[in-house]
């Protein structure tokens, strides 16, 4: 029985979540990817590297990564309270 998992691939400022199936193996090398899923990961990685977001999006969910300045993590970042996001400096009604 195979198990579907999400593998993340990153290239530059892009990251993709690719659904692949793990094939169980009772030996020391399992679980493993099929050759097709391994090639899918490579295709997505290469498309991201080339900036071809449309091609990567056909096989994965693609995200653009934006760096945050270090100060935003201490000054402007939010915290979770009661299952909702509360931004620093905002009333908690």
Image (cartoon, rainbow, N blue to C red):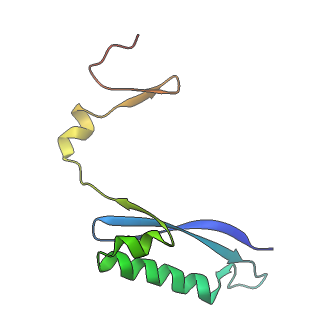
Picture residue at 39% right of the left edge, 30% below the top: 79
Residue 59, percent from left and from top:
51, 73
| In this rendering, position of residue 35 left or right of residue 69 | right
Q: Quadrant of residue 31?
A: bottom right
Q: Quadrant location of the C terminus? A: top left
Picture residue at 52% right of the left edge, 27% below the top: 83
Q: Is residue 77 above or below residue 56?
A: above
Q: Is residue 90 above or below residue 40?
A: above
Q: Quadrant location of the N terminus? A: bottom right
Choose between 24 and 42: the one closer to the eye.
Answer: 42
Choose between 54 and 6: the one closer to the eye.
Answer: 54
Q: Is residue 22 above or below residue 76?
A: below
Residue 28, percent from left and from top:
71, 84
| In this rendering, position of residue 81 left or right of residue 24 | left
| In this rendering, position of residue 83 left or right of residue 71 | right
Q: Quadrant of residue 20?
A: bottom right
């Amino acid at each position: 029985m195979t198990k579907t998992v999400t593998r993340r691939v990153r290239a530059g400022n892009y990251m993709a979540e690719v659904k692949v199936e793990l094939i169980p193996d009772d030996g020391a090398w399992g679980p493993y990817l099929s050759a097709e899923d391994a090639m899918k990961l490579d295709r997505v990685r290469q498309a991201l590297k080339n900036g071809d977001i449309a091609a990567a999006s056909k096989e994965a969910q693609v995200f653009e990564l934006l760096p945050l300045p270090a100060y935003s993590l201490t000054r402007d970042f939010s915290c979770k309270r009661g299952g909702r996001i509360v931004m620093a400096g905002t009333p908690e009604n």
